[in-house]
Amino acid sequence: MNKLLLIILLGIQSFSMKIDVTHELQKCSNIKYHPSRLMCFDTLVRNITPLSEFETLGSDLTKECSHCHGAKYELSTIAGKKPVSKMSIDEIKIALYGYKNGTYGGKDSYTMENLIKQFTKDEIETIIEYIQFKRDKNK
């Protein structure tokens, strides 16, 4: 039974970043009491977002981005600023939350401020994770 569950867990990838799958898997494996162990694995499986679902959500959330930033985020929208493709994940996070809070970008940020206001914190985190995922996938 445990081998089957492990195979299932390894076959599904989590990009929700709300849980560290490897850590949680180890934690569940260390539980000695059988019913608690099964409950731990069950909870873990319920919190994993399948890769295809993550890709669909990420693609949907970022579909407007390519209009200005390019399909690979290679275009700079403001003279002198580096394109998203050249920004670190931390820089992207600072920028997106700054636009959301109205503290980033100055007078040239009107479009981004209005676009990002529609997203929740979880959606912004998914956008950031999706950008990282696409970078890793294209390496």
Image (cartoon, rainbow, N blue to C red):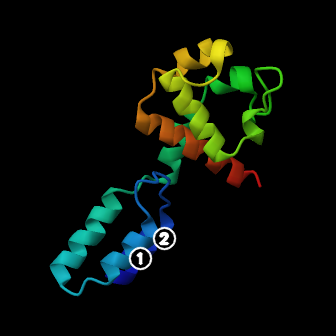
Which quadrant: the C terminus? bottom right
Which residue in the rendered view is the most extreme toward the bottom? 32
Labelled disc at residue 6: 1
Residue ID at (64%, 46%): 89
Determine crowd level at label 2: few under 14, some 14-19, many 20+ residues with C-alpha closer than 10 A.
Answer: few
Callout 2: helix, strand or loop? helix
When asked about the image quadrant of residue 36, the answer is bottom left
In this picture, residue 49 sits left or right of residue 42 = right
Residue ID at (16%, 78%): 35
Question: Where residue 81 appears, x then y in whole percent?
Answer: 78, 28
Question: Where residue 127 appears, x then y in whole percent?
Answer: 55, 38
In this picture, residue 77 sits left or right of residue 64 = right
Q: Nearer the viewer, residue 111 or 55?
A: 111
Q: Which residue is disc 2 drawn over?
A: 10
Q: Is residue 47 above or below residue 100?
A: below
Residues at marks 2 and 1 touching, judged by CB atoms closer than 8 Å: yes
Whether residue 9 is visible, yes or no, is yes
